Amino acid sequence: MVDTWVFAVITLIYLTVIFYLGYLGYKRTKGHDDYLIAGRKINPVVLALSYGATFISTSAIVGFGGVAGQLGMSLMWLTVLVVMVGILIAFIVYGKRTRRLGRKLNALTFPDLLGKRYGSPFMQGVSALVILVAMPLYSAAVLIGGARFIETTLSVNFDAALLAFALIVALYVILGGLIAVMYTDALQGGIMLVGMIVLIILAYSLLGGVTQANADLGALVDQVDPSAISGLVAGGFNGWTAMPDAGSPIWLTLITTITLGVGIGVLAQPQLVVRFMTVKDDRALNRAIAIGGPFTLIMTGVAFTVGALSNVWFFKQDGLTAMQAVDNNVDQIIPLFINQSMPDLFVIVFMLALLAAAMSTLSSLFHTMGTSAGYDLRQYINLKRKRPIKDAEDHAERRASFKASRVGTLAMIVVSVIVAYLMPISIIARATAMFMGLCAAAFLPSFTHALYSKRPSTIAAKASLAVGTVTWFMWTAFVHIKESSAIGLCQWLFGRPSLLDSPWTVVDPLVIALPASTLVMIMILLIQRQRAVIPTTA
Amino acid sequence: MRIIEEVHMMLGIEDPYIIAAYVLSITFALISLAYGLLKWNQEVEEDG
């Protein structure tokens, strides 16, 4: 057990610095442009660390690290995708155009960007609504991740840990807005980087070096109690250093939910997209790529590798797999491994890194939800009431909007805490992947079209957003068995947990909903083009 | 194949798909680093 006093002192120092950065954000926030978009003058290093720290949360480290403890190193394919798609494609293909368009349209949030680009309050309002419905799932998962680690490390009551955690983050997000969020993210990203680098070095040293540890992990599948992995083997599992059987349920979950869901979902996440609009020019984005790529590799690569390797340690200690050691609660694998195997000082460093990871993601999610509620929905309602758009430029309106964003943030923090208390165990990785999958299905086609079309079609965007969102929800509620059985609607209506049979029951909603929303957009664009051509050729 | 064998000897991992995942993720991170460094001081166009 970690020395509580040492941890308390270090945490106090950390929180003092965090609050100081929050105070800086508060002082530099003069109006709603600063609160929503950090005044468009963020430093590239801050951007890179903030983007990375927001993207990589406890979900990636504790949740997906735990999944690697269960399924092995095949999770590394997610690292391939997050570096390639989440950094290279996101910044180069999407980031630069988002920044330019955001500045040109004076967009302040992701829904605002879509609304202004399509000249459609519907796009702004519905995008904000999707965020407000789905993001609490994700923020609650992040809250749980952070609180779980505090609970395991300090034997603090889970409920109390969760509440205190939410309150601390709430304070600097509500007062300091996006400047405070990004400043604290940068510090937190730095702490995470140190924590993960030390973790991989210690883990491999503990297990006899890279080659030895990996070889031991590879051999483990034949040494553990067969009954401990019989369920996994039946699902296609081939060991912790091997891919599962292609097409098996585990392979489908790994590829469709985890790798594609998160790897592609990253492109259309509102809390990440808004960061592209916080910098002055493309050069800042280029510089951020140099830091973002290696940062993301280290964060996810270390978590997945160490998660898988924890099996070797648990086996050497008690002859157990990681899943047996934690009574099948995936989210406990990384915390338990760190607590039992690492020196006390490192447990504290890693705890701080995890707190930092959770706080950086949470603060961004709170901010995005708050601005969706306080700015986007408010604008949508104003426009629906036929209030003139120029109101948004008025001084009084700007002050009201600024205040509404803060109130919206507070309200969404309360909602997230309530959802966190209601969510089941082992949910962190799934809730993260679900949120990212929904973002991709709902937003990606219309976001891409907004950036790359000279005359974007509002109808195509609306249809794509609607079809993507509805398809995702339908597949989640009626087919994807893990969610549909938990929701219970399918059972209640049709007397069975899923409308389709295997393998569809493990195919992620994203794999169905994203092609559907893309296809609808393409079809409408083609029809519109044909209609535009006919009169001119006639 | 020779590279994979060498990486296998070094990493202690047999499955080429797992080795490929490690190699690709490191490669993309290095590409990010190189891209950012090469364009570090590139002139920027004024926003129109």
Image (cartoon, grey):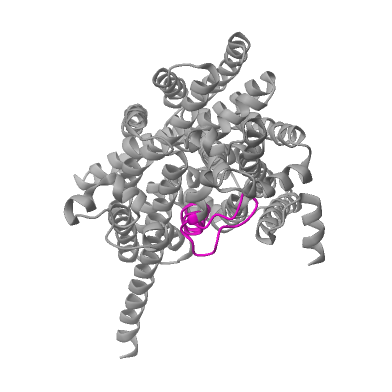
Task: Report whether residue A279 is seen.
Answer: no
Name the residue located 61 percent from the left edge and 24 percent from the top edge: A339
Q: Quadrant of the N terminus of chain A?
A: top right
User: Is residue A335 rendered to the left or right of residue A424?
Assistant: right
Which of A519/A213 is in front? Answer: A213
Who is closer to the viewer here, A93 or A458?
Answer: A93
Residue B10: x, y in percent? 81, 51
Instruction: Inspect the magenta stretch and tell me whether residue A452 lies in it.
Output: no
Percent x, y of residue A20: 56, 18
Q: Looking at the picture, does residue A62 appear above or below residue A24?
A: below
Q: How many marks?
A: 0
**Quarter of the image where one finds residue A92:** bottom right
Q: Residue at x 73, y 42 (%)?
A: A213
**Res A315 visible:** yes
Q: In which quadrant of the rendered image does the C terminus of chain A lie?
A: bottom left
Which residue is at the far top?
Answer: A5
| Image x and y of residue A462, in percent | 31, 60
Q: Is residue A494 left or right of residue B42?
A: left
In the picture as drawn, the residue positioned furthest to the bottom comes out as A538
User: Magenta includes A259?
Assistant: yes
Q: Which residues are magenta?
A: A234-263
Seen in the picture, residue A428 relative to A514 is either above or below; the reply is above
Between residues A363 and A420, which one lies in front from this camera angle?
A420
In terms of image quadrants, where is residue A403? Answer: top left
Residue A153, horizontal then vertical, whole percent: 55, 20
Q: Nearer the viewer, residue A372 or A246?
A: A246
Q: Residue at x 30, y 65 (%)?
A: A459
Left or right: A486 with respect to A208?
A: left
